[in-house]
Amino acid sequence: MSSAFPEIYLVRHGETEWSASGRHTGRTDIPLTAKGEEAARGVADRLKGQTFQAVWSSPSQRAFDTCRLAGFGERLVKKADLQEWDYGAYEGVTTKEILAMRPGWQLFRDGCPGGEVAADVGARADAIIAEVRAVDGNVLVFSSAHFLRVLASRWVGLPPQGGAHFVLDTGSLSVLGYEHDLTEPVIRRWNQR
């Protein structure tokens, strides 16, 4: 389903050892697993026939390698604002382990000690949205789950905390766009595998 308006294609990186085990992976540079590499190659088929005016990636190895394996590495521009949530003291820790230390904790509400809160991630998402809207055409973005969830939330005018309501699997494809005109941003497709 194509649109008369520009679309923003979001690709969550393929599986890593930490994403498979549920460990929060913000700034630690973890490579893709073999399964993650296979999923990244599969992105190429799902994007066949699409044209992009810009291709952007988080500087993380997992996002960059997903982009490269999907066939877009030569056009890639790395953008620091596309980095995953900085989990601070919770880097490499699972939600279950965090809840044992801090019952009731919620990432999107509480943030991470020594790391970012939702408003910090939202400010980076807003900067990316401003750049996307300056591009005349489709944009392809490779990043990580929590950042992309905040980006989608901000795209449709929700607060950064709204990202808590969107789930993204590894290797998934989502599309942001518009409905009737450029003043009506919408989520056109979400978490397609």
Image (cartoon, rainbow, N blue to C red):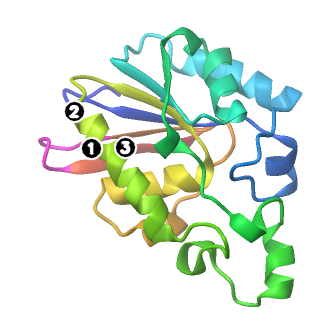
Residue 128: image tag: 3
From the image, tell me which residue sits under label 2: 134
Measured from the top left, where is residue 162 in percent x and y? 44, 69
Measured from the top left, where is residue 165 in percent x and y? 51, 67
Q: Which quarter of the rendering shows the N terminus? A: top left
The answer to whether residue 38 is seen in the rendering is yes
Find the distance from the CA under tag 2 to the CA under tag 3.
Answer: 10 Å
Quadrant housing residue 23: bottom right
Q: Which amino acid, by three-letter code, is at mark 2?
A: Ala
Quadrant housing residue 109: bottom right
- Span colored in magenta: 177-184
Earlier along the polypeptide chain: callout 2 or callout 3? 3
Please, what secondary structure does the residue beneath circle 2 have? loop
Q: Could you tell me how many numbered marks the image carries?
A: 3
Q: Residue at x 21, y 33 (%)?
A: 134
Find the distance from the CA under tag 2 to the CA under tag 1.
Answer: 7 Å
Q: Is residue 41 left or right of residue 6?
A: right
Q: Which amino acid, by three-letter code, is at mark 3?
A: Ile
Q: Is residue 150 left or right of residue 89?
A: left
Measured from the top left, where is residue 189 in percent x and y? 43, 42
Q: Are marks 3 and 1 in contact (CB under 8 Å)?
A: yes
Q: Which amino acid, by three-letter code, is at mark 1?
A: Ala
Q: Are marks 2 and 1 in contact (CB under 8 Å)?
A: yes
Find the distance from the CA under tag 3 to the CA under tag 1.
Answer: 5 Å
The answer to whether residue 187 is seen in the rendering is no
